Amino acid sequence: MNKAMILNPTRPVWPGFSSSKSLCGDANCMEQLLLHCANAIESNDATLAQQTIWVISNLASSDGDSTQRLASSLLRALISRAATRSPAFSFLSAAPVSQETLHRFSVIELASFVDLTPWHRFGFIAANAAILDAVKGYSSVHIVDLSLTHCMQIPTLIDSMATKLINKGQPPPLLKLTVVLAESPPPPLLGISYEELGLKLVSFATTRNIAMEFRIIYSSYSDGLSSLIEQLRLDPLVCNEALVVNCHMMLHYIPHETLSSSRSFFLKELRDLNPTIVTLIEEDADFTSSNFISRLRSLFNYMWIPYDTADTFLTCGSEQRQWYEADIGWRIDNVVAKEGAERVERLEPKSRWFERMREAEFTGVGFGEEVGREVKTMLEEHASGWGMKKDVDDNDDVERFVLTWKGHSVVFASAWVPISRVDGALSYIEA
Amino acid sequence: MPVELDDYSTVSGDASVSSTGNQNQNTPAPQSLSKKKRNLPGMPDPEAEVIALSPKTLMATNRFVCEICSKGFQRDQNLQLHRRGHNLPWKLRQRSSKEVKKKVYVCPVSGCVHHEPSRALGDLTGIKKHFCRKHGEKKYKCEKCSKSYAVQSDWKAHSKICGTKEYRCDCGTLFSRRDSFITHRAFCDVLAEESAKKKLYPETYTRKNHLPEPELKSPPAALVDSPPSVALVPAPAVSVETEPEHDETETANIASSSVLPIRDSSESPENITLQVIMEEAPRRIGLNGSNDHNSNNNKSVYAGLFASSSTASPSLYAASSSTPPPSLYPPSSSIEPISLCLSTTTPSLFGATIQDPPPPHFLTPMSLPPPQPAISATALLQKAAQMGSTGSGGSLLRGLGIVSTTSSPMELSSSHDTGFGLGLGLPCSSGTGLKELMMGNSSVFDPKQTTLDFLGLGRAVGNNNPGGGALWGGGGGMDVFGSGELSDKDISRRSS
């Protein structure tokens, strides 16, 4: 319980335990250790906590294999949690993971960053295909892009619009892009202003003969994007305009029931705007438990994936890997060390999201064979562990895509249209 | 199969397989006697003899070894011919006249698809390659990308096509996928500048009722004296890329052809044309936040970004105009996607036009305001000539007071020397003015950010390896499962 113990840590007392590095490859063991540590922290057992911390710190390494790096990041977060939340652990010093240390990407860097793995490109392809399908025939397309990747999906969408929406001499539709700028967005952080970003996009659209307008709305995910909704309500109704809401890994920053009821509320508000299509791409994991231990377990069982995939494309010590892993570290820290409104990484599993969408009176639409082929072709360019599975939800019989790494679900892609409210019958709205 | 010797059994004799069992795999019709039909791969002739070779045999490349010098050969015939050289008895086997029983081969690895006799491969070379590919170590690595192969012929085949079907951005970065190429291209500074300049000309002509041959009227002397200075404004047209989707190529080509040569013409339109050309640049620049404007102007420009919802635009910035987050508003001089940025201080050439208010519709085509009647073309060009002659490098912009930093040139020159910064297509020698422009440009930027941009490009350009991230040789090459964890089937992450 005192500093002497840190300097001369006692040997842990579990039977049969060895601190040799031969265990470092065993993810199960690592997971157990981390859970022990978490339990110790939650129960204010400083001795046990110290012991576990000592053991884990011997096994974990920020330069080791994926399990070691994951453990290193989790350990740091656990220490941070302990130090900030309980006086019993005040002797621990935690270097807080703050946004200041995170890399700010230039657009070019971000463009190549999002293509390091299919993590984002998967969602881009699926969403763009669904969007393109849904907006055929409209003379104006208004896209509200709620994306973690700062509009990286848009260039390919513009390109597709330019090539596929040309209709017998008719010009392609007018493109309006609305983006949301939040106070402190999660990583990856963009190093230029959204105005500049918009300029580049509009410029690019012009080279493709697409007239484009760009607008930034200040809104906050923590309040359910209320100012966005308000603004969208105020937009004048334009004849023959499609409203597209593209949600790419951002909706989980809207608090859900344990904090506030904003998430479902937002979806219902969205429904009231009668969008032509809503695409929902999210990571398939559950970080919503209010029980810290189960949250940690979920975290461990999901976050090994980004560390594991990093091994396939980035050499140890490369700058991109550092940025990549720093961003992951930030997220881990957020789930472990933060609570309340500060804890923003509240991933929900696919099934729960689908429930919400249905509650909000949306119904799912499938993606089609061609998109599946396109995704698979893309996956072939990446490491062989990536795959895609088609997933039919029991509730609505719609086939959706899930990106997988070594068989484990990573990201799901879904598309939704409003259910008509008249007659009580289920029918698609012709906007 | 631990045995060294080959095992024999027949496909149809195998207990687990019957000849009828093969039928449901769409076995092709019985082979005609006149022509040997190839069976589908992995669906062998039911009457064929199944041979299971050991891994060692399969991996062996040179199975026939000379007893004298131990030189290995892949075929017995070759060994025999070699033995002649040692004056050893040799015999070339003739192709046997009787029908040889067809042999098919299975993969020795249990659990593999081709381990089953019903999925045996009919070709010895085929089974060897299969074994290497699926169960062997990938020893051959492509130099250009990160892919590696176990079979040498696969590697050779890949090397032939590697780098051929690729997308290359003008900044030099290579992409193997179109969508990553498009995404990059949308944000690549080099392209943004080019396309912005290209835009100036088509719009000019469309608004001028498609002037068939816009020409520059000017006293030849003035232009000839200082080509670089004139080259500045029209220069972009030289670099016009002919994209198929652009139907303005015709007008663009006209622009490029008419720029440098001076033709005589007495028509008045070209005065306006030249003026407009000269004016468009500053107008655009003005839109981009020329320092002549205060931040209010910037706001109105951006408010105009969403022009069609006029009720919306006030609310865009109304709520925030009082205290916009500092990160959002770039320093007024920092937005320069168009390299024709003339920084602040010297309106001399374009002064007449900078005072104009920016148009309400920003960066939407066809919405440029009409040109201002102003200085005549002659006067403008004369001024240009004067500026050019006073500048030390003949650079128009130096005359206009653009600062040229010394740090950025080093970045650019060290990273890539094909003049990517001059991706505008200008020959390097005459491009000094522009190069300086771009460096001077970069001084106007937040230097760190530009560094990142340039470095981002330069890094990708000067460092064409997978680590750079831009060249997608494909992560597939970097096989994490080199130890054989990932087979066709089980992909468990827990592997120790």
Image (cartoon, coloured by chain):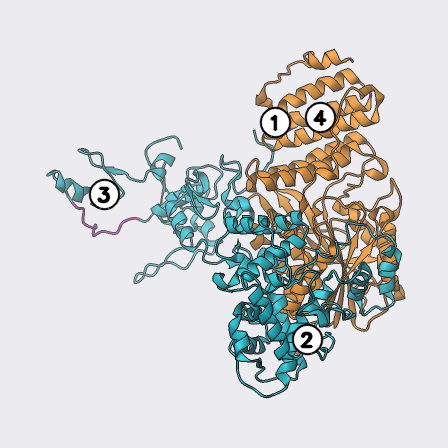
What tint does the image give chain A? orange
The answer to whether residue B93 is magenta is: yes
Q: Chain of mark 1?
A: A
Q: Among the chains, which one is cyan?
A: B
Give residue A314's position: percent from left, percent from top.
Answer: 56, 40
Magenta: main secondary structure: loop
Give residue A337's position: percent from left, percent from top.
Answer: 78, 32
Give residue A222's position: percent from left, percent from top.
Answer: 85, 46
Assess disc 3: are there few (<14), some (14-19) or many (≥20) residues with their C-alpha within 10 Å of its C-alpha: some
Q: Is residue A29 left or right of residue B415?
A: right
Q: Amino acid at mark 2?
A: Pro
Residue annotated with mark 1: A26
Instruction: Indicate which disc residue B76 carries.
Output: 3
Element on which disc 2 rests: loop
Q: Quadrant of residue A129?
A: bottom right
The answer to whether residue B477 is magenta is: no
Question: Looking at the figure, which quarter contains the C terminus of chain B?
Answer: top right
| Relative height, residue B154 to residue B363 (above, below) | above
Residue range corresponding to the magenta coloring: B92-101
The lab-note entry on whether marks 3 and 4 share a chain reads no
Foreground label between 1 and 2: 2
Asked whether the viewer can see residue B184, the reply is no
Question: Looking at the figure, which quarter contains the N terminus of chain B?
Answer: top left
